[in-house]
Image (cartoon, rainbow, N blue to C red):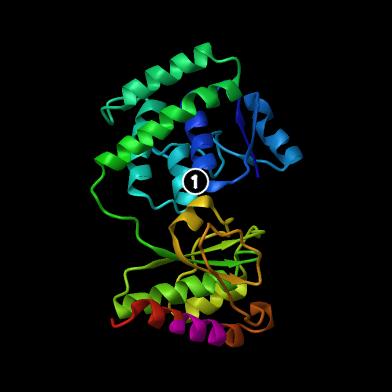
Amino acid sequence: MKWITRERARVDRIACPWLITRFIDPKPEFLFVPAREVLEAGRREQAIPYDIPDVELGHHGPQCSFDAFIDRYELADPALVALAAVVRGADTDDRALTPESAGLYAAATGFQAISRDDFDNMARQFPMYDALYEFSRMQAAPIPLQSRVLFVCLHGAAKSVIAAAHFRRLAAARGLPMGAVAAGTEPEPDLAPGAVKGLAGDGLAAAPARPRPVTLFDLKTASRVVSFGCDIAPRPGQVVDHWEVPAVSDGYEAARTRIVERVGHLVAELAGGR
């Protein structure tokens, strides 16, 4: 995917590319342009804008763009949440937010001054964020990441969303401490209305609020991967289950019945004797 932001990056606009590269996109392409050109160039290049005003992946209240990425891509890693506070303090005037924030601001300012361009700056700063992430992992409570089932369909807008919602419901009923996420290989802009309406009728919420792509973090944290007719590049040793389910557009009930049946078997398998 392509990602675009303002040139002359310092804190957030280097931290976010690091986050994208390490946890989201296996083959990212970054573009840095003058601030006034970001939106136009983004449309022309079909690139996702970040860290500019009035975009989803930007500042919202006290939260910075790094926080927005964590929320949008469901990066439920305690170490990343801790690192987000460090970045937020360094990227805003709240330098006392964490003990590390003022130091990160100073280092980022220095790297900006000595780097040839934004790409050189990324190359210099990425090892620093690797180290800060490892430091955050060491400082965080020793709670392992919750294992998750990754459901993937082409558009990330219907089948995967329905499956994830019912998996969470059935897993909770069995006392199975596992989460579920839905993603797409070619995400649509919005969820399928039929899926949202059908889940509401089941008393369940559709999540995420908008389809999103499969991320590196999804594959890293997935105990199981379920594909609805999609080609997935799993991690070594990771098995992908392929489920055949009727199209939701042809009728919610038929698709729901098949999905819930398969999800029920999966939860029972994973729960074992629970």
**Closer to the camera in the image, 35 or 130:** 130
Q: Is residue 259 magenta?
A: yes
Q: Is residue 178 magenta?
A: no
Q: Which residue is mark 1?
A: 23
**Closer to the camera in the image, 2 or 72:** 2
Q: Which quadrant would residue 233 be assigned to in this image? A: bottom right
Residue type for callout 1: Phe
Magenta residues, start to end: 256-265
Residue 2, compared with residue 173, is above or below; it is above
The residue at the point 42 percent across, 64 percent down is 148
Q: Residues within 10 Å of mark 1 (few under 14, many from 20)?
A: some
Q: Quadrant of the C terminus?
A: bottom left
Q: Is residue 107 left or right of residue 218?
A: left
Tell which residue pokes out farthest to the top in this image.
Answer: 114
Residue 147, compared with residue 69, is above or below; it is below
Q: Quadrant of the N terminus?
A: top right
Q: Picture coordinates of residue 32 (x, y %)?
A: 64, 28
Q: Is residue 135 left or right of residue 194?
A: left
Prevailing secondary structure of the magenta residues: helix
